[in-house]
Amino acid sequence: MTTAFSRSWKHAVVTGGAGFVGSHLCTALLDAGAEVTCVDDFSTGRPENITPLLERPGFTLVQANVAEGLRIKRPPDLVLHFASPASPADYLRLPLHTMETGSLGTRNALELAHSCEARFVLASTSEVYGDPQQNPQDERYWGNVNPVGPRSVYDEAKRFGEALTTAHAETHGTDTCIVRLFNTYGPRMRGHDGRAVPTFVRQALAGEPLTVTGDGRQTRSLCFVDDTVRGILAAAAHGMRGPVNIGNPGEITMLDLARLVVELAGSSSEIRYIERPVDDPAVRCPDITLARDKLGWEPKVRAEEGLRRTIAWFREHEADA
């Protein structure tokens, strides 16, 4: 299936552009002919993610904390707000930074977009659904979130960001879009960021036991980063407000994922069960009917192919991961 809408961007600002998804967005936009300004404070983003882009014409790096303001020399026509710690290891380590990025940072990015009459895209998350009582989750579901639990700094920062984005659009007429990203994986993830795929891959390649939480029956839906980036840019080009789910509707249990990584890595690692984190969702699966119908988008990369490519990247960049 091909994306039904296209739009050319002259200058895109990507906050969190040195992060995992953000760096892939920067690359895709440059490849499409746009100039790109990457804004990152490197609290979780990595310089090596954008090192290959520094010599490319049209790429600019601004090292800054978006919660403290955005000073961009050339007006953009697209603002993609992707700054935020996104893994449990990061947002539990940086709780206040996470909330400030989701609140003050979102406000600053919205004001930049509004002042320049630019299209604004907020990176929200499937975590706004919490530990869902509905499966799969569609965009009409309000979620089941603990507002004071250990994950709340991330969950509520994103929920507030959605509310602020909606209010800005309704009050000021800002051209906004909300994309809710489900579990995305691929090259440039950090092996110690606490998420399942990089953790399992790192452990399998090192011959260590793969640490599966609980009984391993909880599910996730994994979307390869190339597919996620296509979905984000399709939503940006369409003009829809959203929210719209961008993810892979194929569910897999954590135990089956661990076994698949061991097989694809050719590893002899065993499975070791550890305590399940507080408020860890039992299921996670997107209903992508809206993305299919409105954007002509759906994921293309099968789990085996995406995991092979991810494992190959980790092998090549073992010291970086």
Image (cartoon, rainbow, N blue to C red):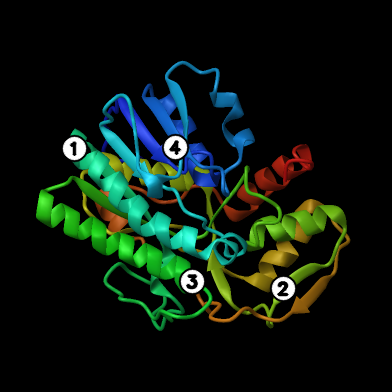
Neighbourhood count class around disc 3 (C-alpha, 10 Å): few under 14, some 14–19, many 20 upward: many
Residue 281: mark in rendering = none
Q: In the displayed structure, does residue 279 sit left or right of residue 38? A: right
Pick whichever, 154 or 140, lies toward us.
Answer: 154
Q: Are marks 2 and 4 in contact (CB under 8 Å)?
A: no
Of marks 1 and 3, the one in the foreground = 1
Q: Quadrant of residue 35?
A: top left
> Residue 88's x, y, as percent?
58, 65
Spatial CA span between label 3 and label 4: 30 Å
Spatial CA span between label 2 and label 4: 35 Å
Q: Earlier in the sequence, mark 1 or mark 2?
A: 1
Residue ID for mark 1: 115
Residue 39: mark in rendering = 4
Amino acid beneath label 4: Val
**Residue at x 65% of width, y 63% of height:** 196
Pick whichever, 308 or 15, lies toward us.
Answer: 15
Residue 165 vertical placement versus 216 (above, below): above
Residue ID for mark 2: 212
SS of the residue under disc 4: strand
Residue 277 vertical placement versus 184 (above, below): below
Residue ID for mark 3: 284
> Residue 10's x, y, as percent?
29, 24
